[in-house]
Image (cartoon, rainbow, N blue to C red):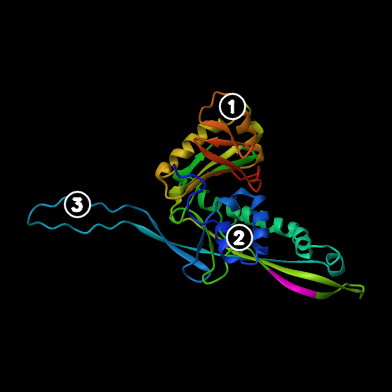
Amino acid sequence: MATIGSDLPTLLDLMKTRDPKGRTLKIIEQKAKWNDILMDAIYVECNNGTKHITSMSTGIPEPAFRKYNKGVQPSHGGQVQVEDTTAMMEDYGEVDAALARKHADEGAYRTQQAKRKLLGFNQKTSRYCFYGNTATEPEGFLGLAPRFDDLSAPSGANVVDAQGTGSENTSIWFVTWGEETCHLIYPENTVIGFQNKDLGEQTKEFSDGSMMQVLRDHFRQDIGLSVPDWRGVSRVANIDVGDLTKDAQSGADLIDYMIDAYYRLQNPEQASGKVAIYCNRTIQTFLHKQAMNGKNVNLTIENFEGKPVTKFLGYPIRRDDSLINAEGRVT
């Protein structure tokens, strides 16, 4: 079974080899703790500057049987070229220079003060991984939801309709993180992932003419998402959270729909990547309650490092609260 923890490089893996000073790595580690998707995803360098071009297969070529002294026609598998772009995210942070120097570890203090900035990067990255739409926001990057929002499209074969019709819909996502299935991207010949540049001490001027000395940081991350093979991703869409019950006697039967979504994946047991499941706090709560009922053998609660972890068919169920309870109906 391909699970989280394969040898494909995550952001933390790559930063450990590229940050000899350790400060940026420390920030990345703190940032990743706030969102599981950053711990799971793998990163691939773009193959065309700030863009990543892949060929998505639309059909598998088959050989022909041949007779002696007879030839065969070469087969051709259908392919569609897909171009994904990266987006630039930037922000600044600053602290009072005099206050920072009163602390024994000035660097640790500045890192602590920067947490809210880092949380903002974290939340936006996660939100755009699911909902980013370059059709309405060209400077952003394309997420998963716009790629799986049409039941009649080829990728619609991997969307399970949970029949919700109200205004309180959400989704559960199965994602195979791998170079051939789904991965994050960063611009060619650039530093990977989150970057923190110390701009040193500068004078800050206020609107009333007063000034103070501050220690300023510049934060930046260039990032995008690529899905070379949509068969490595599946979605349970149209889950009406207002109708959910802990025993699934009414409302969406989450386990039943998740089984459908699992088997929409292309050979999940032999996937050349790592599979994780993403849902928000509301869905995770109901899944936990259903697991406690003891009837759902596919849903288990296991202890990992002293913490309860809910799993489905052995795959971890990750919480991501960027998944909203107000999604439009997928049709």
Q: Residue at x 82, y 62 (%)?
A: 104
The dot on residue 64 is: 3
Q: Residue tagged by mark 1?
A: 248
Which is the main secondary structure of the residues drawn in magenta? strand
Quarter of the image with the N terminus is top left
In percent of width and height, residue 162 lies at 54, 36
Q: Of the residues shown, which amino acid type is indicated by label 3?
A: Ala
Q: Give the distance between the C-alpha atoms of the residues marked 2 and 3, in whole angstroms.
A: 46 Å
Q: Nearer the viewer, mark 2 or mark 1?
A: 1
Q: Nearer the viewer, mark 2 or mark 3?
A: 3
Q: Of the residues shown, which amino acid type is indicated by label 1?
A: Ala
Kindly check if marks 1 and 3 are in contact, taking CB atoms under 8 A apart as contact.
no
In percent of width and height, residue 219 lies at 69, 66
Q: Assign a secondary structure to mark 1.
A: loop
The dot on residue 136 is: 2
Q: Tag 1: Cα neighbours inside 10 Å, few (<14), some, or many (≥20)?
A: some
Viewer-nearest residue: 167 or 244: 244
Q: Assign a secondary structure to mark 3.
A: loop
Rendered position, 7 above or below 251: below
Q: Is residue 192 magenta?
A: no
Q: Give the distance between the C-alpha atoms of the residues marked 1 and 3, in whole angstroms.
A: 50 Å
Q: Of the residues shown, which amino acid type is indicated by label 2?
A: Thr
Q: Which residues are magenta?
A: 197-201
Q: Is residue 52 left or right of residue 252?
A: left
In percent of width and height, residue 248 lies at 59, 26
In percent of width and height, residue 12 lies at 58, 57
Rendered position, 228 above or below 170: below
